[in-house]
Amino acid sequence: MAKLKIEALPEDKPVKVSVELPASVHRDLVAYAEAVGNQSGQPISDPGKLIVPMLTRFMATDRAFIRTRRACHPGKRGDG
């Protein structure tokens, strides 16, 4: 099986955010959570917990966002 980009969920203090997802995105999120659970051996009971690591990885690898962030905040590394 190919290695997934999201491996495990970090333990962190949560902040409540409400978002509406299209049903197809939710189905994919549930399927992704199942794949992560199978790969890690730790079932994920709440697929919504994948959203943070997914967004984090997306923003960390978006080169245009990184350049824009550096331009707006010179001297900051842009990693959090």
Image (spheres, rainbow, N blue to C red):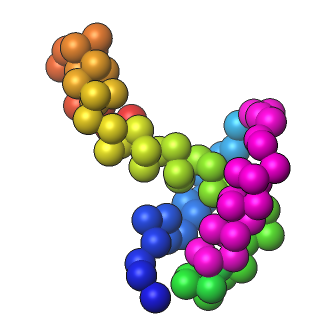
Q: Is residue 6 left or right of residue 75?
A: right
Residue at 41% across / 78% down in the picture? 3
Q: Nearer the viewer, residue 11 or 64?
A: 64
On the image, the x and y values in percent for residue 63 come to 26, 35
Q: Nearer the viewer, residue 65 or 49?
A: 65
Please give the range of residues in magenta: 17-36
Q: Quadrant of residue 15?
A: top right
Q: Nearer the viewer, residue 43 or 19?
A: 19
Q: Is residue 30 magenta?
A: yes
Residue at 55% across / 60% down in the picture? 10
Residue 64 higher or lower than 2, as above or below? above
Q: Is the magenta region chiefly helix, strand or loop?
A: helix
Q: Is residue 28 magenta?
A: yes
Q: Residue furthest left?
A: 75
Residue 49 higher or lower than 58, as above or below? below
On the image, the x and y values in percent for residue 47 come to 73, 61
Task: Assign the C terminus to one quadrant of the image.
Answer: top left
Q: Is residue 44 left or right of residue 75?
A: right
Q: Is residue 20 left or right of residue 29?
A: right
